[in-house]
Amino acid sequence: MKIRKEFLPFSKPSIGEGEINKVVACLKSGWITTGAQAKEFEDEFCKLTNATQAIALNSATAGMHITLSALNICLGDEIITPSMTFASTINMIALRGATPVFVDIDYGTLNINPDLIEEKITKKTKAIIPVHFAGAPADMDKINNLARKYNRTVIEDAAHAVGTYYKGVHAGGFGHIAIFSFHPIKNITTGEGGMITLNDNEMERKLRLLRFHGIERDAWKRYGKGGNPAYDIAEPGYKYNLPDLLAALGLAQLERLQEFNKRRSYLAKLYSEGLKGVSGLDLPQVPEYDHIHAWHLFIVKVLALDRDKFMTRLADYNIGYSLHFPPAHLLKYVQEKYPVKKGFLVETERAADKIISLPLFPNMQDDDVQYVCEAIKEIFKNG
Ligand SMILES: Cc1ncc(COP(=O)(O)O)c(C=O)c1O
């Protein structure tokens, strides 16, 4: 086959005139940091998720940091999480002085195996953090039942899950905390950004304080006409607010969520059809329960070839790729700091050195998917 001249990236944000106009309007408005746009973005997120509160942030990692802080997670506490997750979650647990307790995944979906959670719950367990992996929801009924039985907090890692539904409920709509990401590869982007959704007034108050220095009122209210610029701080906080400039981009992106996810879903179907029956390649499996997949990522598992070699060959064909994720329990500091041994998370490790994320973004053309499928078949044939 003929090798394409133009590099096909793994991901690329879809930014149209609507996004540009909204950001320009914000630039011209005279207010570019957190204010009315961020508030509107929060309101729209409540509507999407059915949560009663939403808090806009400059990353999902910031959201995890202040959530664990607000829950007073500290030395001696244990947090249950899959190892197949982004390192930011484990970093935040470690920075709070707590211990990540890893649960294995389902090899097919890469989602946490809910049947393995209960045996990991101890007196020290403070929270369970499932990930809606690649846009497929974790099995929330089983996880929520366990959380209720043991009275533990659930924090949904919904970084991949804008547009993900489990049995008709959007991620973040189950009554506890969820954290979304708007990093440029995500289903909608603000450049960098995140959102916490929840249904708890007291927790909301704590999170809003932690988001902005520990100061009681938002800056835009203090600097407005008649506002009082004085402040007091009862507890120190961070500086994690989402500027209006970025929230404006997020609002324009959110309007296009259905369009984006419909396209992602269609492209994923094209991939599945194009790669069906390729021997030595495992396609992503989807959960058996009722759900809507956000198709944030299309992750295949390369069995027929060494993955490093496969990546080099994809690069020869001018195709981008990514890796979600190197398992967290095998990261250097995690191995050194915590009692997690290699070989103990069987399915995670079985998948770990085989997974690779193929290009997937709404502006990708049907031909691009066909090109990737043909390239993979040729690579598998010729090595
Ligand atoms: C599963 C998961 N959790 C958390 C994050 C952190 O998101 P952010 O980059 O917005 O901090 C990411 C980002 O890639 C992610 O994939």
Image (spheres, rainbow, N blue to C red):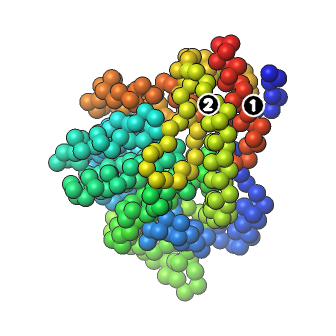
Q: Is residue 14 visible?
A: yes
In the picture shown, does residue 204 fall above or below 373?
below
The earlier-in-sequence mark between 1 and 2 is 2
- For badge 2, the amino acid type reads Lys
* Quadrant location, the C terminus: top right
Circle 2: element type? loop
Which residue is disc 2 drawn over? Answer: 276
**What's the CA distance linking mark 1 and mark 2?**
15 Å
Residue 113 x %, y % = 35, 40
Left or right of 370 in this view: 122: left
Q: Residue furthest left?
A: 123
The mark total stands at 2
In the picture shown, does residue 147 fall above or below 248?
above
How would you rate the neighbour count of disc 2 (Cα within 10 Å): few for under 14, some for 14-19, many for 20 or more? few
Q: In the image, which disc is placed on residue 371? A: 1
* Quadrant location, the N terminus: top right
Front one among 189 and 353 = 353
Circle 1: element type? helix
Q: Is residue 320 visible?
A: no
Q: Residue at x 30, y 42 (%)?
A: 115
- For badge 1, the amino acid type reads Tyr
Q: Residue at x 70, y 19 (%)?
A: 378
**Quadrant hosting residue 107:** top left
Q: Residue at x 63, y 62 (%)?
A: 254
Q: Residue furthest bottom?
A: 226
